[in-house]
Amino acid sequence: MPSDDIPDLLKFLGLFPNPDTAGFLANIFEDYRIELMMRSDYPALGELLDEQNAFHLSRRKSLLLYPLFGQAIECIGQIVLMNGLKEPVPESLEEIVEYGVGLARGIGLNSDVHDAIEAGARLYVFIDDRVGIPESRKKETLQHRRAEQRRRAGSSLNGEKGKQGAEPNPDSGLPEPYSPLMEPDKFDEMVGNFVNAAKKIGRKTGRNPKEVLSELKELYRRGVTPNDMLGLLDKLHGSSPLTRAMLDNAEESTANHNPVYPEWSIAINGYKPRWVGVNEVVLKDGDPNFWSSALEKYSLECRIASSVFRRMRPEGFRRLKGQSDGDELDLDAAVGYFVDRAAKASPSDQLYVKTRKTERSVAAAFLLDCSGSTEGEVLNTGKNTLVLLASGLEELGDSYGIFAFDSPIYFERSISFYIAKDFGEKLAAVKSRFESICAGGSTRIGAAVRHATHKLSQREEKTKVLILISDGRPSAVGYNYEQAIEDTRMSFLEARRSGIHPFCITIDESAPEYIGRMCGENYIILPSVRELPLKLPAFYSRITMP
């Protein structure tokens, strides 16, 4: 922006009763705008920034150290600049935080510093109107305030006590400043120096360093750093493109690791590549009497479910009347033919019956949320329901897998995916696993849906369904309300694109606020988990009947 504009913008912020707060808010939106541009220009840098933000988020101070307006600003800053929340948003501040995050989402790649300052000004007025912002005790210039923020920041990437480690300023009521963007020397250390890498690769392969440099820059925009390529130096030879070596290495490593899936980020309006790892866990055998106890406890529901599944079972052969050719003559149609001729009407030539073998071709994945909030009746009823369901599916003959999932409370880049019964396994061999499903952790739904989708995509059945059973909205570290809803929504879209029909069954009474946005029309809301044993078999019948 023209340098002549800067004094005018600073004068504008100085008109507020508390210029420090006005400037602080403007800086949040300006830093967000700059980070958007960096992520757009350098996709590989996005993952490094996410890791840096997650680290600094863990070191943020408690909200209780700030007055109400400072708490609101801290929550907005964490969501907008760190893509997460260290603590839940106080209920009294939810409206302010939602408004502030909405202002940030209105800033895009075509925005400029004026848009950031306007967003800061709007948020200042909104906060002041709701909880009040005290006037400054002394008129400190914004230049001085910004310089002080930078001085306090230090070099957080070096591990020194910087912005996140300093004590809050009790006089201003403002949170500590947020982390600076990556410094050039740290960029070279973490990403790599393009020129030096091009020279090393050129010497190893005999290629012109300028050509290598051009290829390195193109690879970087696709998420591969110069350091990544230097790590493959021994595999580079002759004039072979760098891309080939990268792909060969990726193919070698994928087979030896648990799957890692991308995650949709609302901060960059795109995917964070290779973001969430899935730790597959085959459940150990539990109480061998659990299965029979579940069938006995829910004997009435079991009989009803069996009746539902019997009605779904193909009859073996189906007679299709009114065909133009077929296996036998349709006597009723033949009589009609002669009646029409006698009446001098145009008779139909559809006089035959075809006999077709009726077969079901259905694969289903059932995905049970076993996060900490399900402990007790919710999880116990869910497990018992899956016992009833599995018994009915065995009688019906559909292919199915029964899985559960949760995610660590303090680590955002992994989930646990529990296998009670995988596709192809015999039920008799795995019945005692169901009792071993336990509650714990949080709810990172997107990665679990993606892994279940991957399993279903390997099946050859014509109809593939994925049924998620949950007690509430997704929530995990670095997986705040907006982020969680959008990533789950994208995982459902990905499933549909793979030819899979995803559905959600929830017992969350607040589900109407988000479930349609998250799942489209493919959901049902139960008023109580006690209805699950009756509703799930009927629901399955409805969505899989031809």
Image (tube, rainbow, N blue to C red):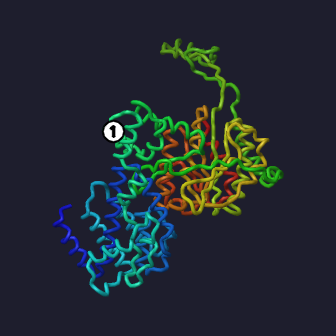
Residue at position x 80%, y 55% in the image: 297
Across and down, in percent, residue 40 comes to 35, 51
How many residues crowd around disc 1 within 10 Å: few (fewer than 14), some, or many (20 or more)? some
Q: Write the residue at 47% across / 40% down.
A: 232
Q: In this view, does 435 lie above or below 493?
A: below
Give me the residue at 35% from left, 62% from top: 32
| Callout 1: SS | helix
Q: Is residue 30 left or right of residue 456?
A: left
Residue 101: percent from left, percent from top: 39, 64
Q: Disc 1 residue type?
A: Pro
Q: Is residue 116 above or below residue 445?
A: below
Residue 134, by quadrant, is bottom left
Q: Which residue of the protein is positioned furthest toward the left in this rendering? A: 4
Residue 335 located left or right of residue 2: right
Residue 406: x and y, percent?
62, 56
Q: Nearer the viewer, residue 195 or 344?
A: 195
Taking the view exactly as shown, the residue that stands out farthest to the bottom is 137
Q: Can residue 41 be seen in this view?
A: yes
Looking at the picture, tell me which residue is in the foreground, 511 or 322: 511
Q: Can residue 507 be seen in this view?
A: no
Q: Quadrant of the C terminus?
A: top right
Instruction: Say which quadrant the N terminus sits in.
Output: bottom left
State the count of labels. 1
Towards the viewer: 137 or 379: 137
Residue denoted by label 1: 209
